[in-house]
Image (tube, grey):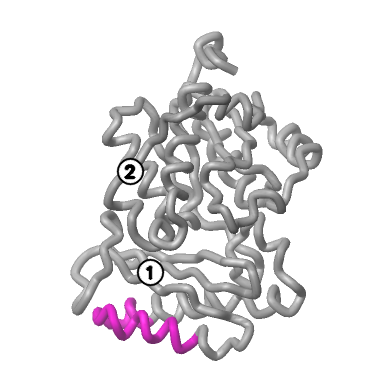
Amino acid sequence: MHGWRREHAGDLGLVPTMGYLHDGHLALVRRAREENSLVAVSIFVNPTQFGPNEDFERYPRDEERDLALLREAGVDAVYLPSPAAMYPPGYQTYVTVEDVSQRLEGERRPGHFRGVATIVLKLFNATSPTRAYFGRKDAQQLRVLQRMVQDLDLPVEIVPCDIVREADGLAMSSRNVYLSPEQRAAAPVLYRALQQARARFDGGERDAAKLRELVRSLIALEPLAEIDYISLADDRSLEEVEGIIEGPVLLSLVVRFGQTRLLDNIELG
């Protein structure tokens, strides 16, 4: 894969994934296909972004199915590095993006974004993409990577892509497979609560605490849902907004259903 792009003319769009692909990933591939003459997808379950008690070993994997989907989608190349190739013995260099990675997921998953930034930079170095495509569902990850690209002067355009949802509003995620039928039936409460907050915001509500409380109260009505956090933060810095909302904000949340953490968010203003 090294030097692959330099042997071909034209733009290269990269879609980095951890595999177990769903329609959200395939929407990224379609967008990359529209905007570049070549499309590459990487599949790598990155051990350095999982904490010691997280789901690295049981993270869903189905390489054969993934490759069939990517062939069908007209992808030009698939990059499938091994953990040993990415992190050989003696590996000791990591990328740390400071402030924007400290809050929310960064607070609850120490080292997570260090692992994400490091692997994405290595993927960029291996494939030399013109553009790289990421979903807005992992909102903090998107902002961490935008900051890394800006601060390190990387010649890559980060292209944010809209969240792809199931018919009932649940954001698509490889981890949705962990949900029991009862949990899966309850999970759309996340998006319903976010939509109610959007409607209230569009109706003129600008009190950050009231919007957070609205989301909390709606999710609390679902007995299977255990709220990890609800955040209403500045869209770029991810600092929590107190008092009156004056600029664009990110309303994001993480809710547990049993052992499964589900993320969702909407951008307001």
Please report contact status of discs 1 and 2: CB closer than 8 Å, yes or no.
no
Q: Main secondary structure of the magenta part?
A: helix
**Label 1 residue SS:** strand
Q: Is residue 204 above or below residue 79?
A: below
Look at label 2 and name its amino acid. Answer: Val
Q: Is residue 178 above or below residue 220?
A: above
Percent position (x, y) of residue 208?
Answer: 27, 78
Percent position (x, y) of residue 203?
Answer: 32, 82
Q: Furthest-top residue in view?
A: 7
Q: Is residue 192 above or below residue 144?
A: below
Look at label 1 and name its amino acid. Answer: Leu
Identify the residue at image location x=19%, y=79%. 243
Other residues around mark 2 within 10 Å, as few (<14) / some (14–19) / many (≥20): some
Give the magenta-colored segment's residue range. Answer: 200-218
Q: Nearer the viewer, residue 198 or 16?
A: 16
Q: Nearer the viewer, residue 197 or 126?
A: 126
> Is the N terminus in the top left, top right, bottom left or bottom right quadrant?
top right
| Lateral position of residue 14 relative to residue 251, left or right | right
Mark found first going from the N terminus, 1 or 2: 2
Q: Is residue 248 magenta-colored?
A: no
Name the residue carrying label 2: 97
Question: Total of numbered circles in the picture?
Answer: 2
Name the residue carrying label 1: 251
Other residues around mark 1 within 10 Å, as few (<14) / some (14–19) / many (≥20): many
Identify the residue at image location x=45%, y=65%. 265
Identify the residue at image location x=55%, y=12%. 8
Identify the residue at image location x=39%, y=42%. 145
**Label 2 residue SS:** loop
Q: Nearer the viewer, mark 1 or mark 2?
A: 2
Percent position (x, y) of residue 149?
Answer: 34, 35
